[in-house]
Image (cartoon, rainbow, N blue to C red):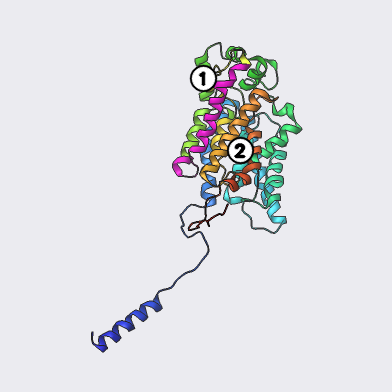
Amino acid sequence: MSPEAKGQTMGKDAKDMQDFKLTVSSSPHVRCTETIPKIMWNVVAALVPAAAFGVYYFGISALVNIIVAIVSAVVFEFLWEKMMHKKITITDGSAVITGLLLAMTCPPTLPWWMSIIGSFLAIIVCKQSMGGLGYNLFNPAHVGRAGLMVSWPVAMTTWTQVNGTVVDGVAGATPLNILKHGGHDAVLQLFGNDPGTMYQSLFFGFRNGSLGETSTVLLVLGGLYLIYKGYINWQAPVVMIATVGVLTWIFGGVSFGTGLFSGDPLFHMMAGGLIIGAFFMITDMVTAPITLKGQIIFAFGAGLITVLIRLLGGYPEGVCYSILLMNALTPLIDRLVKPAVFGEVKTKGAK
């Protein structure tokens, strides 16, 4: 190459180097179009069908509770952020999903002012006092529900049919409550002594309970939508539901007086708040473990505690408390299953 050509080439390379800009920034380096508001509003959309069915089945009181819980959650978040001179984030959908989940874990006939108190506990006590979205250790909706449960247990365990009469004239007559106090035969009697009718009612949602304990099929479809969108992994919900099913099949029959391996797993998987807990609570990006292995451990623990409370505890249902207890263990789980740093080489003799 002649000196002139070589000089021209070097000059061109120098110009190219000047035009090239190297951007140095902190992680994440892999970006996508997903945002917090987009994810939150998609979760809301996934819950809308089940919530709409609850309003159809239980009537106007269910709609009132949903509206009150959502509006009060948004208002509390706005007031807190305003007073603390923080960025207003009420449009990101996180407060809306908290209010909606709270309403769906409570009786549809709950007095409206209790829904406001539940939203206060969820947003102010659980979420904002810990630093806001991304910093709360516990699931806000379940903290609100737990607070209402210990404060007004009668109101939180009184369920009415669409005609306004309490099932069997007793408070708290959900299928799980009837199982706890009357056994499997009493549950079958509630559905006309027909197992097929019982499973059909549990699957489609024609039974007593909170809005999140009614239509199994609509909640599952909502969960599958979130899996399709890539917002949650399928492993955690499957592990929790399977854990409850297998353990109640093995040990659930003891309460019926029929020994081991004689429980009704289908009943326990569709009754209560297991489905909404598995798809919409343990998959919470803030309060669940970071790694897939950690999420599976979390799901198994939540399923195990749910079964222990249902079969041995004083409450007929244990999903809420099982998830809150596992929330407390999330930091420990994350520490135990912490992945190795990329490129890290363990030194000889290191533990």
Residue 30, image x, y percentages:
46, 57
What residue is shown with label 2?
101
The answer to whether the residues at label 1 and label 2 have Cβ atoms under 8 Å apart is: no
The residue drawn where x is 72% and y is 45% is 125
Residue 222 belongs to magenta span: no
Judging from the image, what secondary structure is the residue with disc 1 in? helix
Going by the numbered disc 2, the residue's amino acid type is: Leu
Identify which residue, 58 or 333, lies in the foreground.
333
The residue drawn where x is 66% and y is 37% is 325
The residue drawn where x is 73% and y is 28% is 153
Residue 139 in sight in this render: no
Residue 341 in sight in this render: yes
Identify which residue, 176 or 44, lies in the foreground.
176
Judging from the image, what secondary structure is the residue with disc 2 in? helix
Residue 231 belongs to magenta span: yes
Identify which residue, 243 or 66, lies in the foreground.
243
Secondary structure predominantly adopted by residues drawn in magenta = helix
Q: Which residues are magenta?
A: 226-254
Q: Nearest to the eye among marks 1 and 2: give it.
A: 1
Q: Which mark is residue 199?
A: 1
Most extreme residue toward the bottom is: 3
